[in-house]
Amino acid sequence: MTAQRPRRSWLAVRWRQFRNAPRPVFRAVAANLVVAGILGALYLAYDVALTRGARLPGGDLRTLLATLDVLLVLGVGTVVTYLIVPLPRGADARPRRTAWSAALGFFAAVPIAYLVLVVTSQVLHPLFT
């Protein structure tokens, strides 16, 4: 008779899944996080400049820039993920890319774009003003 291993808690299971994420998922999240981080830093610089009283051409375009930020993260994140996340290979050695690679990037980009804007405007912005 073999001794059964104790069941892992919900948190232990999620922690293990987090530490051992599949490569395509990790690459999709990392690609989108890099794109969102760069665009978020540019948005933060613009927002801080306006808050400090800089006169920039076009006036206050924060709403437009936040919208463009999200759209660019979605678009660029999808394309970058499509390019760097091939599907698993079958018998042939060539990497394959399909719309599923792009869909993975898109669905990874949705929460990341939102979270980066929230962190930028609610956490980092008060530190710089």
Image (spheres, grey):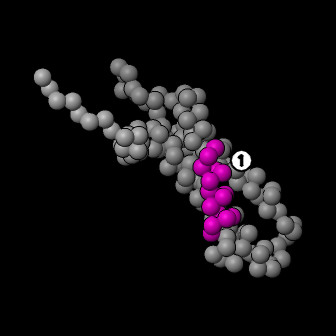
Say above or below: 103 vs 35. Answer: above
Please state the horizontal and vertical placement of residue 73, each as a whole percent of the image: 65, 49
Tell me the crowding category of disc 1: few under 14, some 14 to 19, or many 20 or more residues within 10 angstroms, Cα based.
some
Report helix, strand or loop for mark 1: helix
Q: Nearer the viewer, residue 42 or 120?
A: 120
Displayed quadrant of residue 7: top left
Q: Main secondary structure of the magenta part?
A: helix
Whether residue 18 is situated above or below residue 128 in the rendered picture: above
On the rendered structure, is 7 left or right of 34? left
Is residue 122 on the magenta stretch? Answer: yes
Residue shown at the point (87%, 68%) measured from the top left = 59
Q: Quadrant of the C terminus?
A: bottom right
32 in relation to 8, above or below? below
* Residue designated by label 1: 71
Q: Quadrant of residue 3?
A: top left
Q: Is residue 53 visible?
A: yes
32 magenta-colored: no
Residue shown at the point (51%, 30%) measured from the top left: 97
Residue placed at 62% from the left, 69% from the top?
124
Give the residue displayed 74% in from the left and 69% down from the top: 47
Residue 112 spot, x, y in % from top left: 60, 49
Horizontally, residue 93 falls left or right of residue 124, namely left
Residue kind at label 1, given as amino acid type: Leu
Q: Spot the residue most to the right.
A: 58
Percent coordinates x, y for residue 79 in the rendering: 60, 41
Dividing the picture into quadrants, the one containing residue 98 is top right
- Residue 76 in view, yes or no: no
Task: Locate the N terminus by quadrant.
Answer: top left
Residue 78 screen position, x and y as percent: 60, 40
Going by the image, does 94 lie left or right of 33?
left
What is the magenta range? 110-124
Q: Nearer the viewer, residue 112 or 82?
A: 112
